Image (cartoon, helix red, strand yellow):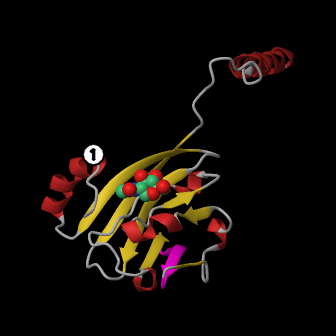
Amino acid sequence: MMEIRYSQVYFLPVFLFINGVSLQQTVVGFIGGSAVLPCSSKDLPHTIQSIGVYWRHSGQNVYGIIYGKVSVKGQHPEYRNRTESFPEEYLRGNFSIKLNNLQHTDAGEYKCYIIKESFVQIVKLLIKEKPERPTSEGTKPRPEMTVMISILYTGIIFSLTVTV
Ligand SMILES: *[C@@H]1O[C@H](CO)[C@@H](O)[C@H](O)[C@H]1NC(C)=O
């Protein structure tokens, strides 16, 4: 049996009502961090060899599990060495993947196709800037710089007007 998680319970009624064939979840990741994109099958696979799963993002190949083996054939270069899955979870029907070193371009909809199932699972990935650390000294002087530059420009424009 598939474990029903809180987020799935939350999205399930809304999405089934609209679409009837897809499941949708949202995951938040931070630049440079990593995110687990969830995908689970309803029925547990009988054997490892019977497993076939594809992950896609905007039509690009992100990841594949074919006959129970990881396949990065045809993987878009953007995802090279940044993806992993959890082989010890396969027989539990868990085909989630982990995407490392997150970039802004990773944001968007990921689709998980489990070959034996008739519906697609959609994971929406939101990418945010790293949360600010409370003691950040190195990243301070920006507002002051902006003020200084505008004072400088005002000064230049003023002196030009005066000379003309
Ligand atoms: C699937 O496996 C990943 C990695 O171990 C874990 O984070 C996730 O919670 C699992 N999902 C389910 C539905 O068990």
Task: Give the camera-side residue of 105 and 91.
Answer: 91
Write down the region rendered in magenta. 58-67
- Residue type, mark 1 in image: Tyr
Is 128 placed above or below 40 here? above
- Residue in the image at 16% along x and 68% along y: 20
Q: Is 88 on the left or on the right of 111, as rendered?
A: right
The residue at label 1 has a CB less than 8 Å from ligand 1: no
Picture quadrant of residue 84: bottom right
Task: Give the camera-side residue of 115 and 18.
Answer: 115
Q: Report helix, strand or loop for mark 1.
A: helix
- Residue in the image at 61% along x and 74% along y: 76
Q: Position of residue 37 (x, y in %)?
A: 45, 57
Q: Position of residue 23 (x, y in %)?
A: 27, 62
Q: Position of residue 134 (x, y in %)?
A: 62, 18
Is 158 magenta? The answer is no
Picture quadrant of residue 89: bottom left
Q: Residue furthest right?
A: 163
Q: Is 143 on the left or on the right of 149, as rendered?
A: left
Label 1 sits on residue: 6
Q: Quadrant of ligand 1?
A: bottom left
Circle 1 residues within 10 Å: few <14, some 14–19, many ≥20? few
- Residue in the image at 64% along x and 67% along y: 78
Q: Position of residue 95 (x, y in %)?
A: 43, 67
- Residue in the image at 43% along x and 77% along y: 53
Is 64 placed above or below 125 here? below
- Secondary structure mostly seen in the magenta stretch: strand
- Where the N terminus falls, by quadrant? bottom left
Is 63 placed above or below 133 here? below
Is 66 magenta? The answer is yes
Residue 29 visible? The answer is yes
- Where the C terminus falls, by quadrant? top right
Q: Is 142 on the left or on the right of 99, as rendered?
A: right
